[in-house]
Image (cartoon, helix red, strand yellow):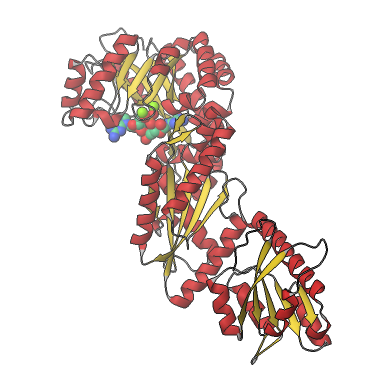
Amino acid sequence: MRTSSKPEREEISLLLVGCHDIVHLLAAQPSGKSRNIRYNVHSAASHEEAMREIENQPFDACLVNFDLAGKSGLDLVRDAAEAKHSLPFILMTDRDDRQVDEEAMTSGVVDYFVKDQVTAPLLRRAIRYGIERKRTENRLTALADYDELTGLANRTHFHGMLRHEMAVANRTGRQLAILFLDLDHFKQINDSMGHMMGDHLLRKVASTLRDCCRETDTIARLGGDEFAIVATHIEDGGGAEVVAQKILGALAEPFMIVGHNVQASTSIGIALYPSDEDNIERLLANADMAMYRSKAGGGNTYQFFDASLIDEVKRKRTISRELRHALDQDNFSAHYQPLFDVSGKEVIGAEALARWRQDDGTDISPAEFIPIAESSGLINQLGERMLLTACMDCKAWQDQGLADVGVAVNVSASQFRRSDIVAVVTRILKESRLDPALLELELTESIVMQDFEEAAHALQRLRKEGVRIAIDDFGTGYSSLTYLKHLPVDRLKIDQSFIAGVEKQTGDRAITRAVIRLGSGLGIDVTAEGVENKGQLDFLSSKKCSSVQGFYLARPMPLKDFVETVRIKNSTLSVAV
Ligand code: C2E
Ligand code: MG
Ligand code: MG
């Protein structure tokens, strides 16, 4: 019945509810040049039967009688809309009634006819117009609800769906999980491979997420490289964990995009409803917090929200607030950790490490406050102050006779990127009158790799000024070593995690040995960080590491103690007092 041998014939599938008596109007063939339309008509007598029909098959339009055995046809219009069936309804009545007319107008039906006044052409036109109007309406809704790039739900639609699913969960007593995802290093991919590749990658990720979720889950792109999922039918946290693992596993395979292998990974935060929070805003904030913890742990992992995260966020906020005050009050100082030759006897340099003394006498670790200073934009101010203090102190110990003992200063990623580091260093060297050869800047591999061209240019200019460059925490960042050939690097500092394992872990021993050999081949000094015992020192000395630093030899200390330590350790040198 539904198929036609003539391709130009259009078929419209109609549901007639309580108005089968007008079916003859649809049977009449239009004359002349009118379109050749065939109506495939189904009938339902009651509201319930109509809902069943609508659930079971897609109709192009529905003609519904106003009077429907105890119910109004408008109830059907409302119930179908609530069940998210979007089809055009045309209301039929037996009598001309002003009240029905008004109700019909506000109910969302596309047209309204009094049965004995309607003609076949009028009805046919109303059906065609109604179908077109609904299509346009659906297209507009899609534009407003979905992300154009990926076709996933957008932020507004996601919030609406989450609210809806929360209400369903309340009714059914089920749990649901909210997963927040943020791609790792997306900016880098976008910057290095171009926005078109970035867009391709976002689309690939979107389709991976679709594959990992159920049809009933809502998947959204909230903006940029942020995605979110409302996973329904979750029995407990275990169900959400399975989804997260599936996503991480699926992303572990690189995508082939325009002939390139692109590796993506993501950080996921999970919050559960109703167990974590009842309020939608706080629920979303919890998932977001958990996502940040995944990110802070290096990414490519998932974390559940737990209450300790709130304390962590509160502490970060307090530190961030107090940082500015501490800068104004000059509550920061530099401690110096001696750098020894590999015998562990002679001090050959120092690393300046920032210290923040609280009013109550306790110290906050730089590992905690430096990232906060970075994100709150105070790092440039703090970094410059540390650089000036270290250069002035080093100049002072030169003047006291500790010649050739230089100082190393850490430079954070955003300080390197956000300030004109060359201009800052040049100005501070001038101000402190320190010999540039005695200043070493410690950068991490990720700083260099984030924008290689720009970093290489800045490092060349620093080298021209006579400043030395060290790569800190070497081995924890990028495994690409080719950059070492192209950059003016003077020192590699093997990360303390490898040194911690040199006695027992064959892998750590092999890496440490390889880095020492690499340095010697390239003519670069190699320092081992975090030496904590004699066994480690002996190993490093046997492998001819250039220098060592660690608690076994000396802890970071205030300036006065540092000067004293150098005097004692280097007593064989003639030190003027
Ligand atoms: P880093 O640059 O790798 O500095 C070495 C860290 O290891 C220091 O921690 C030092 O106290 C610690 N350390 C040294 N020897 C040992 C050892 O034998 N065992 C162990 N377990 N640890 C050892 P600290 O002072 O807490 O600094 C942590 C990190 O904070 C630094 O790591 C550096 O990345 C950052 N930082 C410190 N001061 C500054 C600064 O002025 N500016 C910037 N941008 N970052 C800084
Ligand atoms: Mg360092
Ligand atoms: Mg280090």
Nearer the observer, 256 or 478: 256
Vertical relation: 215 (above or below) 350: below
Vertical relation: 462 (above or below) 298: above
The picture places residue 81, in percent across and down from the top left corner, at 63, 73
The picture places residue 66, in percent across and down from the top left corner, at 71, 85
Q: In the current view of this chain or complex, which residue is farthest to the front?
A: 5
Vertical relation: 359 (above or below) 500: below
Nearer the observer, 576 or 359: 359
Residue 263 seen anywhere in this rendered image of the structure: yes
Residue at image position (19%, 25%) is 536
Location of residue 533 by image quarter: top left
The number of callouts visible is 0
Residue at image position (48%, 56%) is 229
User: Ligand 3, what quadrant?
Assistant: top left
The picture places residue 117, in percent across and down from the top left corner, at 83, 83
Vertical relation: 254 (above or below) 86: above
Nearer the observer, 57 or 403: 57
Residue at image position (80%, 63%) is 34
Q: Could you tell whether 471 is left or right of 513 in the image?
A: right
The picture places residue 443, in percent across and down from the top left corner, at 44, 24
Residue 312 seen anywhere in this rendered image of the structure: no
Q: In the current view of this chain or complex, which residue is farthest to the top?
A: 574
Residue at image position (71%, 62%) is 137
Q: In the current view of this chain or complex, which residue is farthest to the bottom?
A: 70
**Quarter that holds the C terminus:** top left
**Quarter that holds the N terminus:** bottom right
Nearer the observer, 2 or 89: 2
Q: Could you tell whether 428 is left or right of 577 in the image?
A: right
